Amino acid sequence: MKRILSILVLMLMLSPVSFAGEGFDFFKLHVFNNDTREIKSLLNSQVRYANKTNFEKFIATYDKSYINSDGFNLDTYSKLVKDIWQTYDNIEYGITIKDISVKDNVAKVEVTETSFAEVPAPAHLDGVLKSESESVYYLKKTDGDWKVTSDKVLNETTSLLYGAARDLDIKLTAPQEIQAGKEYTASLEFTPPADVIAIASIASDKVEYPQKQAKEVYRKLPDDNILERIFISNNDNVNEYVIASIGLTKADVSDLSIQLSLTGFGYKIVRVNVVPEKSEDLNVKDR
């Protein structure tokens, strides 16, 4: 079960996968046979293990051949999970299984996943993490046991907001999918509290591990409360994240002096899946 923890280790972005299955004609099962029961049990057990940060049992649900749509193999994914759980050990994970398709010893599962955590911070600016994604899991049955071989995130949104920013209705929009090397627009919109100075930035970065920190160029939020930026998707056949950063400050005037105090800050992240120009060259990797 992939965790949607995009900003957590300053964008230690973990993400999903695509399957090495080329054009399986999956048929849908509308009764709960042994396979569907076992698959549901496996994915629900991932949530239990993740909520208990039981690394060994969690990773054991993945096949050794696992590779995801961001190009992370099992070794890289394992390192990422360890990093996140060492930094945030109180995340509550959830999963809703929407559909299961099975053919012989392979399966495809559509799910909605969520993450939530209260994040303590100094200066009474405690934060909250919220994340949701729509994903597809691919599984294989070997020696009688189902294992996850790949997964792919279709869309994903993560927010990490502190202090007064927790109460904001922040809208960050970007295309869910874009062809490599193409221009696209990302838009950030929110209404700051009264008497507050709001600054914000929008950046874009490739999904990779270790994750690099996106370059931030803060600007004062325009009068219409909308900030936009144009990006060009990468040509490296790598998925991207659009990252919005915001800061809220309040001015206190006393004895002809002005003192600015931070009242809130945070991040919102959305995924942009990049479609290669020559997808046939990727063979089993459907990014």
Image (cartoon, rainbow, N blue to C red):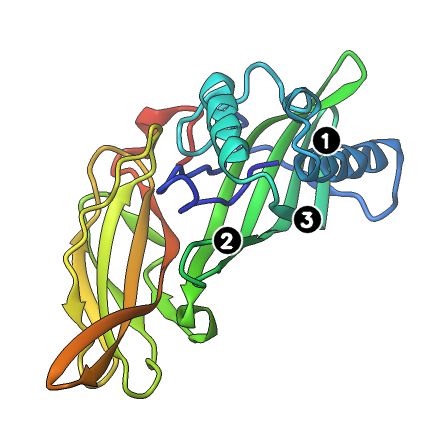
Q: Secondary structure at mark 3?
A: strand
Seen from the viewer's position, the closer of residues 247 and 43 is 247
Which numbered disc, 2 or 3, marks the residue closer to the eye? 2
The amino acid sitting under disc 1 is Lys
Res. 242 visible in picture: yes
The amino acid marked with disc number 2 is Pro
What is the CA distance from the residue labelled 2 to the residue labelled 3? 25 Å
Which residue is pictured at 25% across the width and 80% down the height?
225
Q: Secondary structure at mark 2?
A: loop
Along the polypeptide, which appears first: circle 1 or circle 3?
3
Residue 176 visible from this viewpoint: no
Residue that appears at 89% across and 37% down: 33
In-image side of 231 versus 157 (left or right)? left
Residue 233 in the image, given as x and y percentages of width and height: 21, 47
Discs 1, 3 touching: Cβ within 8 Å: no
Tag 2 residue: 120
